[in-house]
């Protein structure tokens, strides 16, 4: 192992049995070196952090642009979009993924944004990554606008799976939440993704009090009857309008009780493996002996999963964010463009991840707590 400079062994395999230093019951301060002071890590250490977590799930934002304006994410007027030359090019993306996978232990890739489908070279990006990594799971999180025209090409290029964000099946509610009247187009995109075999299709829905919360059981019925896996998401304080409140948010517990109107939920026995979604088997009340499908609940606020976090994020500008809620970023794009070799890039990436906060961008979990400071970037600019 490459940890030197008197650093204690902190990798997961070297932790005391039964303990995880990222659990909220442990002290807020890191177990070793202060923030920014990283030990000499070898490539074999991968994307290890001070709390012993190792990131294997790379989430790469392809653009900050989007054609929707979801109220919990973007302001109505949009944002100041990045100039094209400030954004990772296809070749830079392919190279970063290669370094992550071949050198740093990345085992799955999520392409996100902004809206990844607005990138004209999306199919070429997927094909370029797939050419290097025949077995890498590559998934896309998208609002599905225009997916009906691109789904087959994406499948052919090597995309494995898709997550579509869809908060309502009612045109008016959809338009209220996204500030755009495009429900039909999104539904066409979802259907085409399923048709070409970009499955298992997952659907992401953020529940907003008084807007789409009452629709939760209908959304679930729609999803399970089509073989989709729906995930309900607690709203996080990452919106441009700073409109989030703890009381306004629909909690995971509320979500479960909303669904109980029509369904019985029982814990899914499969392992969670650090995934944001806690999964439940779904049975309709009318046919309680038949498992109709699965639902996931993503309780980032009330039931945080930071202790098992395996995610590393790279923004469209090529900056590493070790946590969704980080206040620090590490520029890899400038390094790539300076002619640096792969070793230099991977070292910088490792240093960034070593400084990963314990939870929610802080030394403890607590979205919306008195000491929580919302990051400057919105969810769309981070890469959700
Ligand atoms: N707090 C927190 N929330 C996250 C994180 N990653 C994802 N989420 C939340 O989970 C939602 C769904 O993320 P997706 O990228 O669609 O999918 P996923 O759940 O990570 O992955 P799969 O189940 O493998 O498709 C996001 O919109 C976020 O709200 C994370 O690292 N931290
Ligand atoms: C930022 S979007 C990027 C990809 C694509 N535009 C989409 O909407 O799927 C990724 C995910 O973040 C979620 N999201 C955005 N803002 C959020 C917030 N404040 N709290 C929780 N989830 C949020 C969206 O619902 C979406 O599922
Ligand atoms: S959640 Fe996705 S679709 Fe909605 S505004 Fe944000 S980036 Fe766009
Ligand atoms: S908030 Fe940060 S540490 Fe927690 S799960 Fe998300 S990215 Fe990981």
Image (cartoon, grey):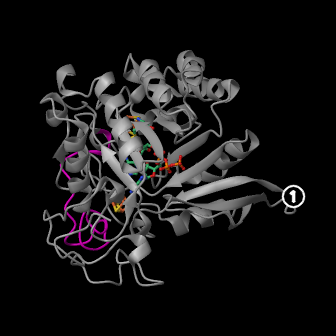
In the rendering, at what x and y percent does residue 163 appear? 54, 39
Q: Quadrant of the N terminus?
A: bottom left
**Image quadrant of residue 227?**
top right
Q: Quadrant of ligand 2?
A: top left
> In this rendering, does residue 105 appear at all?
yes
In the rendering, at what x and y percent does residue 121 appear? 39, 17
In the rendering, at what x and y percent does residue 303 appear? 45, 70
Nearer-the-camera pick, 11 or 118: 11
**SS for callout 1:** loop
Nearer-the-camera pick, 68 or 156: 156
Q: Is residue 316 magenta?
A: no
Number of disc labels: 1
Residues rendered magenta in the picture? 357-380
Residue at left 62%, top 60%? Answer: 279
Name the side, left or right, on which 141 lies relative to 190.
Answer: left
Query: Is disc 1 surrounded by few (<14), some (14 to 19) or many (20+) residues within 10 Å?
Result: few
In the rendering, at what x and y percent does residue 208 appear? 45, 52
Reply above or below: 364 against 100: below
Q: Quadrant of the C terminus?
A: top left
Q: Main secondary structure of the magenta part?
A: loop
Q: Is residue 378 magenta?
A: yes
**Image quadrant of residue 50?**
bottom left
Name the side, left or right, on which 171 lies relative to 52.
Answer: right
Name the side, left or right, on which 120 lies relative to 276.
Answer: left
Residue at left 55%, top 32%? Answer: 134
Reply above or below: 32 against 85: below
Q: Which residue is mark 1?
A: 287
Whether disc 1's CB lies below 8 Å from ligand 1 is answered no
> In this rendering, does residue 81 appear at all?
no
């Amino acid at each position: 192992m490459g940890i030197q400079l008197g650093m204690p062994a902190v990798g997961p395999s070297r932790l005391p049995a039964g303990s995880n230093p990222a659990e909220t019951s442990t002290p807020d301060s890191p177990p070793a070196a202060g923030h920014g002071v990283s030990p000499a890590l070898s490539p074999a250490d991968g994307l290890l952090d001070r709390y012993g977590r190792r990131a294997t799930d790379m989430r790469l934002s392809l653009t900050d642009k989007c054609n929707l304006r979801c109220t919990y994410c973007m302001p109505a007027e949009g944002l100041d979009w990045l100039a094209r030359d400030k954004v990772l090019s296809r070749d830079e993306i392919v190279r970063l993924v290669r370094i992550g996978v071949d050198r740093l232990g990345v085992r799955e890739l999520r392409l996100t944004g902004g809206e990844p489908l607005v990138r004209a070279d999306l199919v070429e990006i997927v094909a370029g990554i797939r050419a290097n990594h025949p077995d890498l799971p590559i998934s896309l999180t998208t609002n599905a606008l225009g997916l009906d025209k691109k789904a087959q090409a994406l499948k052919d290029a090597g995309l494995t799976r898709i997550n579509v964000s869809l908060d309502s099946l009612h045109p008016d509610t959809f338009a209220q939440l996204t500030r755009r009247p495009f429900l039909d187009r999104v539904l066409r995109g979802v259907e085409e993704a399923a048709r070409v075999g970009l499955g298992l299709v997952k659907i992401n829905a953020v529940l907003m009090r008084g807007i789409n919360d009452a629709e939760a059981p209908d959304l679930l019925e729609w999803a399970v009857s089509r073989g989709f896996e729906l995930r309900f998401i607690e709203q996080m304080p990452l919106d441009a309008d700073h409109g989030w409140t703890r009381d306004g948010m629909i909690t995971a517990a509320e979500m479960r009780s909303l669904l109980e109107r029509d369904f019985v939920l029982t814990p899914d026995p499969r392992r969670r493996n650090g995934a944001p979604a806690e999964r439940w088997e779904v049975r309709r009340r009318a046919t309680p002996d038949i498992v109709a499908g699965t639902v996931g609940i993503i309780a980032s606020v009330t039931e945080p999963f930071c202790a098992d976090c395996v995610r590393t994020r790279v923004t469209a500008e090529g900056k590493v964010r070790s946590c969704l809620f980080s206040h620090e970023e590490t520029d890899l794009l400038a390094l790539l463009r300076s002619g640096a070799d792969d070793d230099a890039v991977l070292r910088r990436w490792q240093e960034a991840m070593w400084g990963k906060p314990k939870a929610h961008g802080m030394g403890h979990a607590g979205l919306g707590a008195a000491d929580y400071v919302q990051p400057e970037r919105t969810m769309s600019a981070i890469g959700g």
